């Protein structure tokens, strides 16, 4: 049975008009797809409506894929790639923000499609990680994304020391993220754990109103107390 393609469709990083951050070919593709795998249906409907499907949301088939999805539920998504008559149908994968399948459970669907011979097509859109690296002034030749650091203070501080050591050894920029309500505790741990000479970049609200990207040494950050607040934020260090 023939199968359609999987399109990885980026979404805005905040509450803004999709046309402000997504290229026209992405918006055109959205209007051609009526089956979507999404992280959360409510926010996906809002995004798809704003992206050009307003008035057609009820015609769409939305299936959720998130951290609670089982292997069986993920496997069942394969049925979306063909219709009742066996004709191929394209499917869109949408994350809550930014690029799908990057620090996102949608990666499991992309992997499944590769195993099944289904073409996976990434589309252009905003990436908070790459835009933070671009704006940081840190090493863009060698870098690593560390995901979320541990939530517990002592474990987090130990991990901070480990990635600082790796950064120094490899001359590598280390990139990581945090749940917004823990941003300020993360900042406090960074300032208390990192060496004074280590460079630290804080990139918050990228592409949104109030965007701030600031890079200084830890010694300089300590002279200027800074509250990030509950904003989407990317942290970068270079020892």
Image: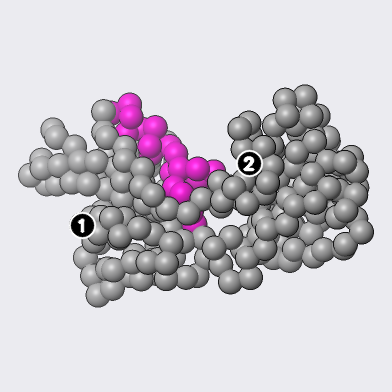
Residue 168 seen in the current view: yes
Report x, y in % for residue 87: 10, 42
Q: Is residue 112 left or right of residue 80?
A: right
State whether residue 204 is above or below residue 145.
below
- Asked if marks 1 and 2 touch (Cβ < 8 Å), the reply is no
Residue 95 seen in the current view: no
Mark 2 lies on residue: 147
- Residue with the most extreme bottom position: 55
| Label 1 Cα neighbours within 10 Å, binned few <14 / some 14-19 / many ≥20 | few
Report x, y in % for residue 63: 34, 53
In the figure, residue 143 lies in which quadrant?
top right
Q: Which quadrant is home to the N terminus?
A: top left
Q: Earlier in the sequence, mark 1 or mark 2?
A: 1
Determine the residue positioned at 68% across, 46% down: 137
Instruction: Specify whether residue 113 is painted magenta.
Output: yes
Determine the residue positioned at 71% across, 61% down: 181
Mark 1 falls on what kind of element?
Answer: loop
Mark 1 lies on residue: 32
Please give the range of residues in magenta: 97-116
State whether residue 86 is above or below residue 177.
above
Q: Is residue 191 left or right of residue 58?
A: right
Determine the residue positioned at 36% across, 43% down: 122
State whether residue 207 is above or below residue 177.
below
Mark 2 falls on what kind of element?
Answer: strand
Report x, y in % for residue 25: 28, 55
Q: Is residue 99 left or right of residue 176?
A: left
In the figure, residue 70 lies in which quadrant?
top left
């Amino acid at each position: 049975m023939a199968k359609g393609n999987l399109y990885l469709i980026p979404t805005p990083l905040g509450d803004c008009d999709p046309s402000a951050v997504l290229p026209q070919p992405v918006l055109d593709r959205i209007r051609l797809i009526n089956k979507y795998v999404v992280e959360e249906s409510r926010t996906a409907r809002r995004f798809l409506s704003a992206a050009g499907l307003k008035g057609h949301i009820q015609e769409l088939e939305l299936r959720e894929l998130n951290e609670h999805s089982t292997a069986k539920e993920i496997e069942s998504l394969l049925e979306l790639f063909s219709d009742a008559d066996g004709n191929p149908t394209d499917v869109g994968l949408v994350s809550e923000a930014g690029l799908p399948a990057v620090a996102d459970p949608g990666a499991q669907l992309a992997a499944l499609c590769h195993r099944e011979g289904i073409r996976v097509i990434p589309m252009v859109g905003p990436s908070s990680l790459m835009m933070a690296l671009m704006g940081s002034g840190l090493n863009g030749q060698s870098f690593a994304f560390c995901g979320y650091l541990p939530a517990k203070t002592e474990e987090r501080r130990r991990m901070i020391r480990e990635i600082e050591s790796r950064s120094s050894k490899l001359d590598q920029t280390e990139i990581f993220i945090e749940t917004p309500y823990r941003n300020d505790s993360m900042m406090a741990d960074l300032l208390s754990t990192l060496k004074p000479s280590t460079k630290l970049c804080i990139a918050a609200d990228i592409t949104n109103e109030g965007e701030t990207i600031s890079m200084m040494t830890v010694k300089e950050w300590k002279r200027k107390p800074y509250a990030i607040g509950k904003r989407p934020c990317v942290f970068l260090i270079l020892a």
